[in-house]
Image: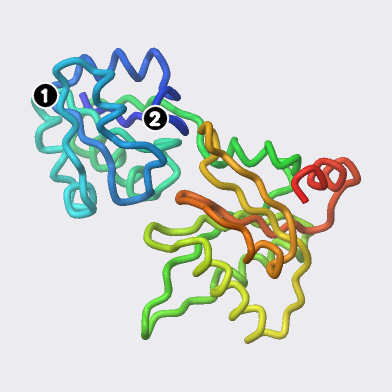
Amino acid sequence: MFYLIGLGLNENGYSKEAFDSIMESDFVYIDVYTVDFPYPIKKLESQFKKKKFIPAKREIVENFEILEEAEEKNVALLVYGSPLTATTHISLIEEAKRRNIKTKIIHGASILDAIAETGLHLYKFGKTTSMPKWQKNYAPESFMDVARENNSIKAHTLILCDIGLNFGEALEQLETVLLNRGIVLGKIVVCQLMGTKNQKILYGEIGKLKKARGIENPFCLIIPSELHFTEKEFLENFD
């Protein structure tokens, strides 16, 4: 059996079904490359007696090495948040089925649920996009293409910020793209460590947000489109 298990948003956010499946597994892997965990993994591992969590880096997951053991043993892959947010995990399930390996998906809360705490209506969000950390010869602006497409249908845009990208860098990259394209942006939303005791929601113009201190990973940005009056009233609580 191959278990793909969503852990939710904090170290106690997994379900009873997830706990039982982990305890039944012969090998337990934990995805450590698709997101920054907001808590020490050891803190989670300590809740499962005699279970050793094996870090699963990109090559182990993308090369399907993890499935070789699942052909004869019970294997679990633990994923922060929701188990099927990353296309890599969907590919794992598809490959497992091709190999006639039994699979079970156990869902967990994700940032896609938690952003409702901003007061923005979830059904008004368009395509989700991501912002990578720019390198010397790699500075993609495609996240703004998605935002403009969403805005054309009055939909909000969730921008997931990749591992290794800190808050200051994310705002600088966003400012650079806006300048390059001659776009004037109003207030945006910042969500930090959602679902944890240290979660924080900020709402304001980029200049104001740049003065914020202590924003930790994982965090995301939201570019709102046209606001319903109830959304506007709720967001003002974070201004």
First along the sequence among labels 2 and 1: 2
Mark sitting on residue 43: none
Residue at 44%, 31% (x, y): give it: 10
Q: Name the residue under label 2.
A: 7
**Quadrant position of residue 90:** top left
Residue 47 point in image, percent of width and height: 28, 18
Q: Disc 1 marks which amino acid?
A: Lys
Which type of secondary structure does the marked residue at label 2 adopt?
loop
235 sits left or right of 56 in the view: right
Residue 211 % position (x, y): 64, 64
Secondary structure state at the residue bearing disc 1? loop
Question: Looking at the image, is 201 positioned above or below residue 170?
Answer: above
Residue 124 vs residue 223, the one in the foreground? 223
Judge from the rendering whether residue 134 lies leftward or rightward of residue 181; answer left or right: left
Q: Is residue 211 left or right of residue 93?
A: right
**Front residue (pair 64, 125):** 125
Residue 209 occupies quadrant: bottom right
Q: Which residue is drawn at 10% across and 38% down?
A: 68
Q: In the image, which is nearer the foreground, mark 2 or mark 1?
A: 2
Residue 118 screen position, x and y as percent: 71, 42
Crowd band around label 2 with a 10 angstrom C-alpha radius: few (<14), some (14–19), many (20+): many
Q: In which quarter of the image is residue 72?
A: top left
Q: Position of residue 192 (x, y in %)?
A: 55, 47
Q: Which residue is drawn at 87% across and 47% down?
A: 228
Q: Is residue 164 left or right of residue 183?
A: left
Q: Which numbered circle lies on residue 73?
A: 1
Q: How far apart are marks 2 and 1 (CA)?
A: 21 Å
